[in-house]
Image (cartoon, rainbow, N blue to C red):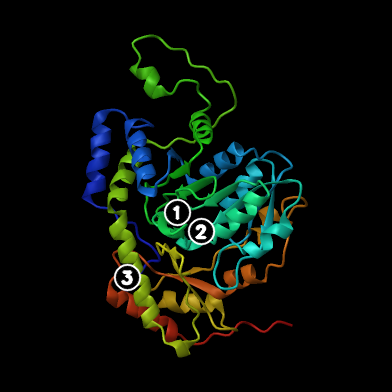
Amino acid sequence: MSQIPVAKPVLDEREVEAVRRVILSGWVTQGPEVAAFEEEFADFVGAAHACAVSNCTTALHLALMAVGVTAGDEVITVSHSFIATANAIRYCGAVPVFVDIEREGFNIDPDLIESAITPRTKAIICVHQLGMPCDLRRVVEIASRRSIPVIEDAACATGSEIFWKGRWEKIGKPHGDIACFSFHPRKVVTTGDGGMLTTANPEYDRKFRLWRQHSMSVNDTVRHGSRQVIYESYPEVGYNYRMTDLQAAVGREQLKRLPEIVARRRELAEMYRRSFDAASGIGLPIEPSWARSNWQSFCVELPNGWDQRAIMQALLDRGISTRRGIMNSHLEQAYAGTGSHRVATGMQNSLRAQDRTIILPLFVQMTDVEVSQVASALQSAPVYLEPATV
């Protein structure tokens, strides 16, 4: 039986040739390809500055450091996100303050932010979950009134758009203070692994570039190209958060085809929507009128009482891979300790989203027939009810 995976990166001879070019150049670590990728990514999203790093988790860490988050501070975000969002806050010695997500969607509920703010609040991280833009206008509005920086966790949102002040703009412009992206293979654009920070603030960008390379006073490109001996210095503690030229070369090819990737993913999402029978009770994702998702994932809600794991197993038995709904960090053992986090609101929507949703296969190479197969298999699966609780 052929397997339909949840995701599959779009890679071919163009990426192979790009990597070959870099290998033969003799310069494979951070260098001219990274610089070119940064320039091209900034141009694509409409940002003044873009800085490439090793992954989105390191991007979030540097973003939090740049806006001044330190030990004992609080950062408002959602528990309903991959654990890296909360972990990056903990890296700074700060406390994640979790608020619930919206009922109709998987993003932060702006109505809950203000009540979670305290004198210790130093930043807000809003997540564009599964590629669907969150309500940035309202988040930024609240944060501006309270002079709190906004960091966008745009890990899944490369190529997504938001209607902003009368026109469509790419996520990553950025509309908050800093936006952070992932190029993991599950994402729409991949470099194997990797990340990017975008900002309009030149001082933030300067800090990213210093910290990502051990806070070295002179980067190695300048040092190796100099006709005079240069002794670098290390004025502060930094990190090894660099992207390689091998990765960046792949990223540049991926970026060229991003518009067609997003267009096809949007076609597939619409195909899914048409394939589900309204009578099935399957809840479909909602795209607000002011958002254009890249449809990094297509996440559906199961009817009340359906056993999530049993349904996923039934699909797997038919050759269809799925994933459960996005995790909730506050339920993980890593966050069981006193002082590891603060839950500022009820979490009913976040819990529902984790336990009653599944992510269906969606990738560019997916055929129309496969979309129909997945939708049909889910709608015709035996109804497994959740075990009764005592």
Q: Is residue 343 visible?
A: no
Q: Are marks 3 and 1 in contact (CB under 8 Å)?
A: no
State the image quarter where residue 106 is shown.
Answer: bottom right
Which x, y percent locates residue 340?
72, 50
Which amino acid is tagged 2?
His
Q: Is residue 259 visible?
A: yes
In this view, 101 is above or below 39? below
Determine the CA span between mark 2 and mark 3: 20 Å
The crowd level at tag 2 (other Cα within 10 Å; few <14, some 14-19, many 20+) is: many
Q: Are marks 1 and 2 in contact (CB under 8 Å)?
A: yes
Which x, y percent locates residue 236?
59, 24
Classify mark 3: helix, strand or loop. Answer: helix
Q: Residue at x 28, y 53 (%)?
A: 257
Determine the CA span between mark 3 and mark 1: 20 Å
Classify mark 2: helix, strand or loop. Answer: loop
Which amino acid is tagged 3?
Glu
Q: Residue at x 56, y 29 (%)?
A: 238
Q: Is residue 55 left or right of residue 363?
A: right
The crowd level at tag 3 (other Cα within 10 Å; few <14, some 14-19, many 20+) is: some
Which amino acid is tagged 1?
Ile
- Going by the picture, which residue comes out furthest to the front? 166
- Between discs 3 and 1, the one toward the N terminus: 1
Q: Residue at x 50, y 21 (%)?
A: 217
Query: Disc number at residue 267?
Result: 3
Classify mark 1: helix, strand or loop. Answer: loop
The crowd level at tag 1 (other Cα within 10 Å; few <14, some 14-19, many 20+) is: many
In this view, 188 is above or below 360? above
Pick the front one: 219 or 175: 175
Query: Disc number at residue 171?
Result: 1
Which x, y percent locates residue 306?
56, 82
